[in-house]
Structures are given as C-alpha cells and as structure tokens.
Image (cartoon, rainbow, N blue to C red):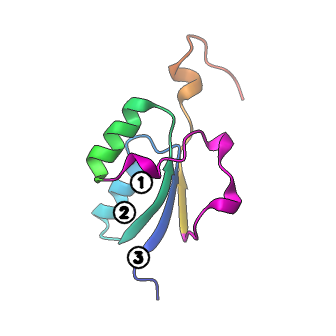
Amino acid sequence: MIKSLKLLSLFTGIGAFEKALKNLKIKYELVAFSDIDKFAIKSYCAVHNENEEKNLGDVKNIDGTKLKEIDFMTWRFSLSRYKYSREPKRY
C-alpha cells in the first residue's frame, strides 16, 4: 500500500491538481513540477509551500531518465500560446 503518492506535476500553473488532492485528503509528495511562467512559479511555491528548486523548467527540456520514481503525473493544457500572443495558434 502506498503511504503517499509521489507526484510529478507538468504545466503546473498555480497547482489546481495539488489543491484537489489536498481537498480529497490524498497524501502526496511532490517529486518535481514544471512551469515556465515566473509568476505562476512564485504563486505555486507560496500556495503549496514548495521550493522553487523543484521546478524542472520548460517541459521540452526535461530528461526523463533523470527523474526520481513517480506514482502519479498531472498536467494541464498549456495556455502559453494564447497568453503571449494576440492570435491563438491552432493545433
């Protein structure tokens, strides 16, 4: 039985998934998170009492072979294409 989930959070934002886990009383240990927005990173760390050193930065540059063992991974749709441009780009 797992005592707490080892969590990897991608495109983290302010950590809505982590907040949901807390609300559901699901214990987890944050292994790492990934975001590139400096304001989201500051907010995330303040809200969830985490160290910015756990931020892996741009998800495109993550070397999966160097990640610690994880049980659970969360991600959300990245809004940066919309946030930083006037014209939304189609996928």
Q: Residue furthest bottom?
A: 1
| Residue occupying the point 65% across, 60% down | 66
Of badges 1 and 3, nearer the viewer stands 3
**Is residue 64 toward the left or the right of residue 35 in the image?**
right
Residue at mark 1: 17
Badge 1 element: helix
| The label number, if any, that marks residue 79 in the structure image | none
Residue type indicated by callout 2: Leu
Badge 3 element: loop
Over which residues does the magenta segment extend? 50-71
The magenta stretch spans residue 90: no
> What separation in Å lies between label 1 and label 3 (alpha carbons)?
15 Å
Q: Residue furthest top?
A: 86
Q: Quadrant of residue 73?
A: bottom right
> What separation in Å lies between label 1 and label 2 (alpha carbons)?
6 Å
Of badges 2 and 3, nearer the viewer stands 3
Residue type indicated by callout 3: Ser
Badge 2 element: helix
In x, y percent, where is residue 62?
65, 48
| The label number, if any, that marks residue 4 in the structure image | 3
In x, y percent, where is residue 83?
50, 21
In x, y percent, where is residue 79?
53, 30
Report the quarter where the C terminus lies. top right
Residue type indicated by callout 1: Phe
Q: Earlier in the sequence, mark 2 or mark 3?
A: 3
Q: Nearer the viewer, residue 2 or 57?
A: 57
In x, y percent, where is residue 86?
56, 10
Residue at mark 2: 21
Circles 1 and 2: CB distance less than 8 Å? yes
**Is residue 64 toward the left or the right of residue 39 in the image?**
right
